Amino acid sequence: MHRIGVVLAGGLSSRMGRDKAMLSWHGRPLIEHQIAMLQAAGVDTVHVSGDRPDYQGIADPVAHAGPLGGIAGIAANCSDGDLLIVPVDMPRLQSALLRQLLEASTPSGSTHFTGHVLPMRLRLDDTCRTALKALMAANDHRMRSLRALQERVGVSVIPLNAEDEMQLIDCNTEETWREVCE
């Protein structure tokens, strides 16, 4: 099955106060770090969700629909396969941990680590496309969540040890960013 890396980079970064994707991580923009992590994990191609022309970004079909909107945009522009989805704001994420998601033998339409919705492997197929369409059409914007998508396609959870847990710190604020950079 085709393996497609996805960097979710379409958010407003409102809590950070500046564009998280462009934060410098080890001398390059964080978005480039995440692209490299996906490539090193073994995906066939990488797509960026969000209006990011410099990275051939795919704009969300519905503005301000959160991560689900980003995934819906990617899904509309990709053939079926396994999506390996990462947020742009997890700088400590390493390719070996991502490979665990790719290589996990799980029967469900989605797989993630215990206690974390992202990163996530998502099987992009007719079931997933139907679920995305229904969730994006929901009148209640609270239904537009990754958890709701996982419930609709089925979810498997992989245990996570304490050392790997440290890779999944997301940086939504300046304070968290400073802590991660120390």
Image (cartoon, helix red, strand yellow):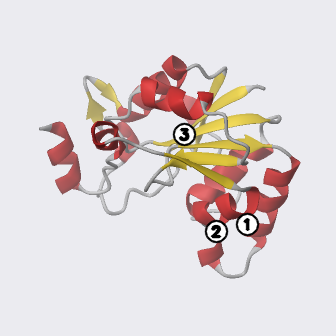
Q: Is residue 60 left or right of residue 98?
A: right
Q: Is residue 60 visible?
A: no
- 103 vs 77: above or below: above
Kindly report the distance in space between the C-alpha atoms of the residues bearing marks 2 and 3: 22 Å
Distance of mark 1 from mark 3, alpha carbons? Answer: 22 Å
Residue depicted at 52% across the width and 30% down the height? 100
Circle 2 residue: 144
Query: Quarter of the image holding residue 1?
Result: top right
Q: Which residue is mark 3?
A: 52
Q: Earlier in the sequence, mark 1 or mark 3?
A: 3
Q: Tag 3, which secondary structure?
A: loop
Tag 2: amino acid: Arg
Of badges 1 and 3, the one in the foreground is 1
Residue 3 point in image, percent of width and height: 69, 27
Kindly check if marks 2 and 1 are in contact, taking CB atoms under 8 A apart as contact. yes
Q: Amino acid at mark 1?
A: Met
**For marks 2 and 1 on the same chain, the one whose residue lies earlier in the sequence:** 1
Helix, strand or loop under label 1: helix
Q: Can you identify the residue that label 1 sits on?
A: 136
**Residue at x 56%, y 35% (from the top left corner):** 101
Q: Position of residue 63 (x, y in %)?
A: 62, 62
Q: Position of residue 99 (x, y in %)?
A: 52, 26
Q: In the structure shown, which secondary structural element does the residue marked by tag 2 occupy?
A: loop
